């Protein structure tokens, strides 16, 4: 999965923020408050996001209604996991990452690791990635 392009991200952000299905017209109207964008452009990008599996869609009358197929957090986590897959030294990459995050982000990471340990879960991949093992 690659990072979203600018318009893809704007569309996904709106749908994630709204937390409800929406038509292309609704997205276009909201985007046009900030910058001009054509209906057909948004329709094309929404279709691309659907093809990529990031948006689901259903017919509502004559229009498609789009909704994210995963949460923003799930998408972000997958990007992070793929980024870690690009290094031969995952523990070192994680250590550099932890050095660069804010104290608030570090506290959130510790909380998440603690919650996983309390649940007895090793993460979605069973802890096979060679991660920090709770040493944040």
Image (cartoon, grey):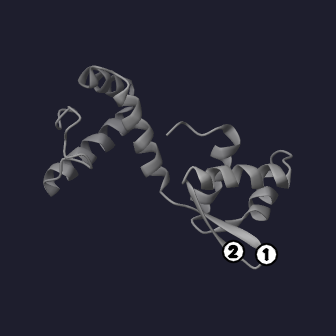
Does 25 sit above or below residue 11?
Answer: below
Residue 17 sits in quarter: bottom right
Q: Which residue lies at the image location 51% right of the left edge and 60% below the top edge?
A: 69
Does 26 sit above or below residue 118?
Answer: below
Does 52 sit above or below residue 94?
Answer: below
Label 2 secondary element? strand
Q: Considering depth in this image, is 93 or 42 the residue closer to the camera?
A: 42
- Specify whether 109 is left or right of 122: right
Are the residues tagged 2 and 1 within 8 Å (C-beta)? yes
Q: Which residue lies at the image location 46% right of the left edge and 43% below the top edge?
A: 76
Q: Considering depth in this image, is 11 or 135 the residue closer to the camera?
A: 11
Q: Answer few, some or many: residues within 10 Å of disc 1's Cα (few below 14, many 20 plus, some between 14 and 19).
A: few
Residue 47 in the image: state x and y as whole percent. Answer: 69, 55
Q: Which residue lies at the image location 69% right of the left edge and 74% below the top edge?
A: 59
Q: Considering depth in this image, is 22 or 106 the residue closer to the camera?
A: 22
Residue 101 in the image: state x and y as whole percent. Answer: 39, 29
Label 1 secondary element? loop
Q: Work out which quarter of the rendered image holds the C terminus and state it.
A: top left
Q: Which residue lies at the image location 83% right of the left edge and 53% below the top edge?
A: 40
Tag on residue 59?
Answer: 2
- The answer to whether one can see residue 32 in this image is no
Residue 34 in the image: state x and y as whole percent. Answer: 80, 47
Q: Answer few, some or many: residues within 10 Å of disc 2's Cα (few below 14, many 20 plus, some between 14 and 19).
A: few
Q: Residue furthest bottom?
A: 61
- The answer to whether one can see residue 118 in this image is yes
- Specify whether 81 is left or right of 60: left
Q: Residue furthest front?
A: 51
* Alpha carbon separation for disc pair 2 and 1: 7 Å
Residue 43 sits in quarter: bottom right
* Residue matched to label 1: 62
Residue 90 in the image: state x and y as whole percent. Answer: 27, 25
Does 114 sit above or below residue 68?
Answer: above
């Amino acid at each position: 999965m690659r990072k979203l392009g600018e318009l893809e991200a704007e569309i996904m952000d709106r749908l994630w923020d709204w937390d409800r299905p929406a038509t292309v017209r609704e997205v276009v109207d909201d985007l046009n408050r900030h910058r001009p964008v054509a209906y057909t452009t948004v329709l094309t990008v929404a279709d691309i996001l659907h093809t990529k599996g990031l948006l689901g869609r259903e017919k509502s009358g004559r229009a498609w209604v789009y909704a994210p197929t995963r949460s923003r957090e799930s998408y972000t986590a997958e990007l992070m996991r793929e980024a870690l897959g690009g290094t031969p030294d995952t523990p070192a990459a994680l250590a550099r990452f932890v050095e660069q995050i804010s104290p608030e982000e570090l506290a959130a990471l510790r909380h998440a690791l603690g919650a996983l340990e309390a649940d007895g879960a090793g993460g979605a991949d069973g802890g096979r990635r060679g991660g920090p093992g709770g040493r944040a």
